[in-house]
Amino acid sequence: MNCTLALRMLDAYIDDELDAATAAEMVEHISSCAACAALHGQRVAMRSALRASALRHVAPPELRQSIMRGIERPAQSRSPPRSLRWWQVLVVGGSTAVLGALGGWWLAQPPALESLPEFAVARHVASLTPAGPRIDVASSDRHVVRPWFQGRLEFAPMVRDLSAQGFDLLGARLERIGDRQAVAVVYRLHSHVINVFSWRGGGESAVSEREATIRGFNVVIWSDRDMDFAAVSDTDSAELKRFTAAYRTP
Amino acid sequence: MHLDSAYNLARWITRDTATARDAVQDGCLRAFRAFDQMQGPNARSWFLAVIRNACLDLLREQRSRAVEEEYDEDLHGSRVAADGGGAITPEDIAARASDAQWLRNCIDALPRDYREVIVLRELEELSYKEISAIVDIPIGTVMSRLARGRDLLQQRMLFAHRRSRR
């Protein structure tokens, strides 16, 4: 390798973007050419200076909050009257789609524990369509629902028959919580949809059961062995707790 | 969390806290609307491309009020290699490396084309392929802009260093 070529390749070399053979030629050239070695030294010194000195600007916390508010506002201003006409359902559907999109954006991030209820509510809202909750495998028979996930999922979802307690199984669908594969098992109590999300937690987020209310949705979060769960519904919190207790009982 | 990356990029492109904030807000709204495209391993690049476009739109609006300062090459000299024996040494850089504000000023003084690829490569540590997607230029251009940008930055650091010694 000559100096002209080496200088042209210098940046790709320090950026680790060269193929192995060319990189090896660079190493050889730099070790034998003082001028190119000096330029290489400057580049390396500049890189360590840039990376050592906390030059990255961090988003101010109020920016994060105002982005959240900006997305929520259109949904709230369109809150529906008590009796819904079909077109109103579409309007609400449209605004929840915005919330759903927000949820999706959050979900593209690794889930932080404190924002988990937000994730879960966003995914819950995203699943609600005017035609009913989104479902990949629709059945009230858990022996139909559970096997559907074989080969599609790295764990077996927990699907329980809770019809005796008043919770009708509607089905289930594949989900994502952050970068994790997840399942949402969908139940109905009267007119309320309940989504139970479950995913392999990896232990670091082991929490005892806790509750939250976000934008009118109740959320219950818990861990069981290596699995994390989040139940979300617009039913009242007492009913959701009753559901969670039934679902958790083996 | 991509929001920090978004804000960092916006702040370096716009060189202003308030404008960066507005750009990130705009960009997030655009990104949410086009959520369907935001799946898969390229989500971060795509999101940063949206943020970058929001920055450029805002800057274009502001340009009616002020012209973006251009880097004066005649004043600051051109390629470092052509500068001869008085070139900056790694020791010169190291001597000032702890001074973050000084480094920031040096980067801020670069034209935007070079500034953004340097920020994406050195601060966000993205690959050429990712930078190419965000800035919408071929990978070869990423490489040549980084080379030129680093030359300019080294030159700038030397210039600022010498001036501070006087």
Image (tube, rainbow, N blue to C red):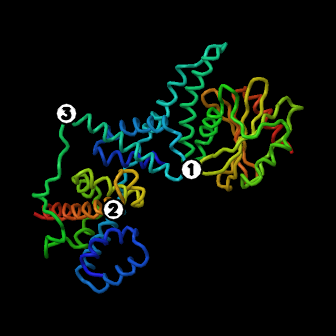
The disc placed on residue B65 is 3
Percent of width and height locating residue A194: 73, 33
Q: Chain of mark 1?
A: A
Judge depth for marks 1 and 2 and give the one in front. 2
Q: Secondary structure at mark 1?
A: loop
Q: Which residue is mark 1?
A: A110
Of the image marks 3 and 2, the number of the one nearer the N terminus? 3
Quadrant hosting residue A221: top right
Q: Which residue lies at the image location 60% right of the left edge and 40% below the top edge? A: A119
Q: Where is B66 relative to A235, above or below?
A: below
The Cα atoms of the two marked residues, 1 and 2, are separated by: 32 Å
Percent of width and height locating residue A227: 73, 51
The Cα atoms of the two marked residues, 3 and 2, are separated by: 34 Å
Q: Which residue lies at the image location 89% right of the left edge and 32% below the top edge? A: A164
Circles 3 and 2, Cβ within 8 Å, touching? The answer is no
Q: Which residue is mark 2?
A: B140
How many residues crowd mark 2 within 10 Å: few (<14), some (14–19), many (20+)? few
- For badge 3, the amino acid type reads Arg
Q: Secondary structure at mark 2?
A: helix
Q: Where is A37 relative to A210, above or below?
A: below
The disc placed on residue B22 is none
Quadrant hosting residue A121: top right
